[in-house]
Amino acid sequence: MSLPGGYMGKILRVNLTDQKLRDETLPDNVLRTWLGGRGLGVYLVLKEIDPKVDPLSPDNKLIFLTGPLTGTAAPESGRWCSVTKAPLTNTIHDSQSGGKWGPELKFAGYDAIIIEGASEEPVYLWIHDGKAELRDAKHLWGKDTHATTDMIIEEHGDSKIKVMCIGPAGENLVKIACLINDKGRAAGRGGHGAVMGSKKLKAIAVRGTMKPPIANESKFMESVRANIDKLKKHSVTGEALPKYGTAVLVNIINKHGILPTKNFQTGVHPTAEKYSGETIAEKILVKRVPCWGCIIACGRYTRLPKDSPYAGEGDGPEYETVWAFGAQTGVDDLDAITKANFLCNELGLDTISMGHVIGTLMELYEKGKIPEEKLRGLVPYWGNPAAIVELTWRTAYRSGIGDDLAEGAKRLAEKYGMPEVAIVVRGQELPAYDPRGVQGHGLGYATSNRGGCHLRAYMIAPEVLGVPQLVDRFDTKGKAELVKVFQDGFAVVDSLVLCKFNTFATWLEDWVGLVAGATGWDVTLDELNKIGERIYNAERVFNILAFGDGKEYDTLPARLLKEPMPEGPAKGYVVKLEEMLPEYYKIRGWKDGRPTRAKLEELGLKEFADKLEEAGLLPE
């Protein structure tokens, strides 16, 4: 059978325990069933990883994937993703990143890499034009992500090499450690950097000159032009994001009273303007930095003044970052916020979780739960700019109180006797939207398979931004159906490995032509919708087998369910989860948070229904 277009037709399996590498292929039917990226990663994880595995043991695997549109002319297709069992959440977990590393992996001849086992000594993987080899990385161990990238490029003498690596945080098995590529792009969430560190894999460097084949060039390019036209004409992708970057959301979200402030104690930060996208553009923006093949160019490169105590330069900060180090900690010092962002990039830390967990610490400190001797003179009061910079360092190196922050907000709050101040879902820190003022977004958080996340169902689009159309954000009616549509659709985006900003201007019906043209498949809209639903159900199956996922976990912190928003436009509201969850389960074909056999067989997942039944976990 001939290979579909869009793919390079080869995946690389690397066993670090015995240092052996081999090329493999995947059947056409597997690719068409799961597409690539997140979907294909979920399939491989379900087939190859024991759901009960310790995420930091050699038996866990780390899979890097591209999609059928990666490295093609499809707009916003310069991305890649990582899939594993995450140490932060113990869930199946995918993390996505932009930059230029993903397309370069395809140009080097591979659609995906499966990393298994663990090396005794630090190594890095070098892939170039269809060849792959492991190299000694002892000289790189301990280096930050910038130094690691520079040293590998210098070693090979080719400035076009793209490097993805971990920093000290990943080496130190920090559970909020991320993967950094191109020095400033991050597969941030879940602690994938710690998984890579546990395997003593410091970096993957890629370089190639091949191109993915396109099955029907004229059909594909016709669809490319139509998608680009919509992106350029849309106010979000054609104006707001290019001009102010993702931090354009700061003032919008704050005005709606849902900018989580001081660990979600309120939704209004009076001085948020000081770190907004508009202020960043005025004071520290140097240039826009697009990902490979991107026409939006929301990425920022910024520089702090030389006379600032936080002087430095680099990529970012993004919206989620300025919120995490800003409102979440009560800090409004743009220089300190940006410096903490730079450090996260260099040390390999997820900015969302890092800022969030500092906010958790500040509330614990405010309530007298942190012994002074743990702080070594540091005073983590709300709004302390120096503290967010210092605690970022300490976390990466597990120094003092940083050793506790390295375990994430849930374990930190539990250790100091106040689990209720951990604002998490399935162990993952919630991002930059207080769901008390956006009911559908709250349902999306609660039912997210990878833990608290805004990127499983970005209900901010319809509930705040009016995309595709504005709905009443305080009403629960109809939200269950909308959340499912977004969750399934976003699973497709992540499997084509497109940027989610596409979804402001285009949706699945716009991508049918891209997929059909690239692959040569007679794919339909219904087929794409079904793929998205299949992926979401398969993820839930893994979690059920891993830790008994279900209704008990489909919930939110009590603060969001029982404590009304104290002020602002969302004053008086809580998340009315009980009004939405039963309808959501009904629409999903689930019982108490678990898919039924009928639903799984409808999606072609009979073998996984059998596994649930064997484990006594299939609902009756």
Image (cartoon, rainbow, N blue to C red):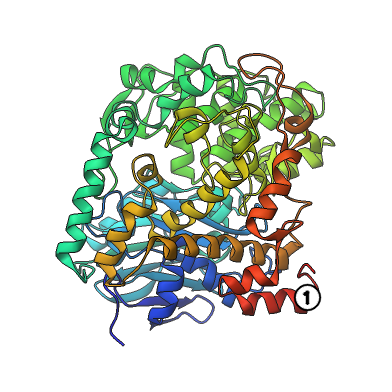
Number of marks present in the image shown: 1
Q: Is residue 257 above or below residue 168?
A: above
Measured as percent of width and height from the top left, residue 518 is found at 26, 66
Measured as percent of width and height from the top left, residue 432 is found at 56, 32
The quadrant of the image that shows the N terminus is bottom left
Compared across the picture, whether 243 is left or right of 469 comes to left
Q: Amino acid at mark 1?
A: Ala
Under tag 1, what secondary structure? Answer: loop
- At label 1, counting other C-alpha atoms closer than 10 Å, the crowd grade (few under 14, some 14-19, many 20 or more) is few
Q: Is residue 534 above or below residue 296?
A: below
The quadrant of the image that shows the C terminus is bottom right
| Residue 365 visible (yes or no) | yes
Compared across the picture, whether 102 is left or right of 318 comes to left
Viewer-side residue, 201 vs 553: 553
Q: Is residue 508 above or below residue 548?
A: above
Viewer-side residue, 141 vs 191: 191
Measured as percent of width and height from the top left, residue 234 is found at 29, 34
Q: Residue at x 38, y 39 (%)?
A: 504
Q: Residue at x 63, y 33 (%)?
A: 439
Q: Quadrant of residue 17?
A: bottom right
Viewer-side residue, 480 vs 519: 480
Compared across the picture, whether 455 is left or right of 11 comes to right
Q: Residue at x 44, y 42 (%)?
A: 346
Measured as percent of width and height from the top left, residue 325 is found at 54, 28
Q: Quadrant of residue 37?
A: bottom left
- Residue bearing the label numbered 1: 615
Looking at the image, which residue sits at the far bottom? 1
Viewer-side residue, 418 vs 483: 483
Compared across the picture, whether 582 is left or right of 416 comes to left
Q: Residue at x 79, y 51 (%)?
A: 552
